[in-house]
Image (spheres, rainbow, N blue to C red):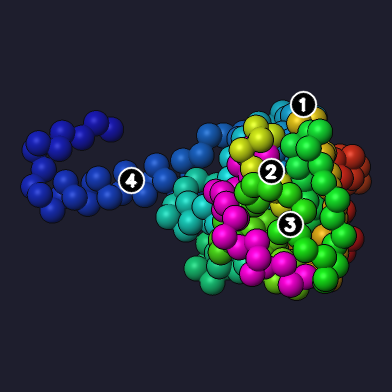
Amino acid sequence: MIFNVYKLNLYQAIRLWCTLALLLGSPLAHAEGKITVFAAASLTNVMDEIAAIYEKEKGIKVAGSYAGSAALAKQIENGAPADVFISADVRWVDYLQQKNRILPETRKDLLSNKLVIIAPKGRGFKVTAEKGFDFSKAFDGRLCTGDLESVPAGVYAKQSLVALAWWDAIKPRIVGTQDVRAALAFVERGECAAGIVYETDAKVSDKVELVARLPDETHAPIVYPVAAIAGSSPQARAFMEYLSSPQAAAIFTKHGFTVIAK
């Protein structure tokens, strides 16, 4: 049906445009045979691999959108057409659950990770990850990590720095980025002399070297929850089941993630 909005009164026109906007922004308007996954930036490589295998096996395209968990959660809250959300911490899935934007019954803790200190390749330095070590004097230059208030990697990093009593001395030299892959890129280019990222991020780059692992007890558990977005199709839930399959677990493990058994 074709509408001529010029023949509608103002009230009818507003109703028409609102209806069209809701339809275009709803999961019903998603392309048939396509699943859109909003995932934390640290999952970029592994999810691209899983998506390619899933499409080959099932004939259903999986499109990934990668960024900081906070940014993705805000986009979903504002109506972005996502089907599945995988966050790098529980905070942002909790946030969407409170906003009734996910299906709580589909929520599951999927993966875990490690937090590490990195340096540009060939510019490593010695670190003892314990209280009493003067981390601020171990290197010259800036320390890059995710934004300390919203990006999970940055939140975990700040917790570790505080727990190890390194925070006060290093705080003025910290650069917070929009996601963990941006922090990795700064270190790769040598714009930051050190970075705090996930161990899986360090493994994907041949331009950085791992300096030290930060003890698990210095930060909250690193958990990647997954959940289907409210209104998503049964296809999305089928893909979530695949993420918990032995095939997907093997790929996650290959990339350095720890699969959380349930």
Image: 96 above or below 123? below
Residue at (51%, 39%) from the top-left corner?
30
Q: 155 or 170, which lies in front?
A: 170
Screen quadrant of the N terminus: top left
Secondary structure of residue under mark 3: helix
Q: CA distance from mark 1 to mark 2?
A: 41 Å
Q: Amino acid at mark 1?
A: Lys
Residue 88 drawn at (x, y percent): 69, 56
* Closer mark to the observer between disc 4 and disc 2: 2
Screen quadrant of the C terminus: bottom right
Tag 2 residue: 193
Q: Amino acid at mark 3?
A: Lys
Using residue 210 as the reference point, say whether residue 185 is left or right of it: left
Secondary structure of residue under mark 2: loop
**Callout 1–callout 4 Cβ contact below 8 Å:** no
Image: 97 above or below 81? below
Residue 21: mark in rendering? 4
Secondary structure of residue under mark 1: helix
Secondary structure of residue under mark 4: helix
Q: CA distance from mark 1 to mark 4?
A: 33 Å
Tag 1 residue: 56
Judge whether residue 183 is colored magenta.
yes
* Closer mark to the observer between disc 1 and disc 3: 3
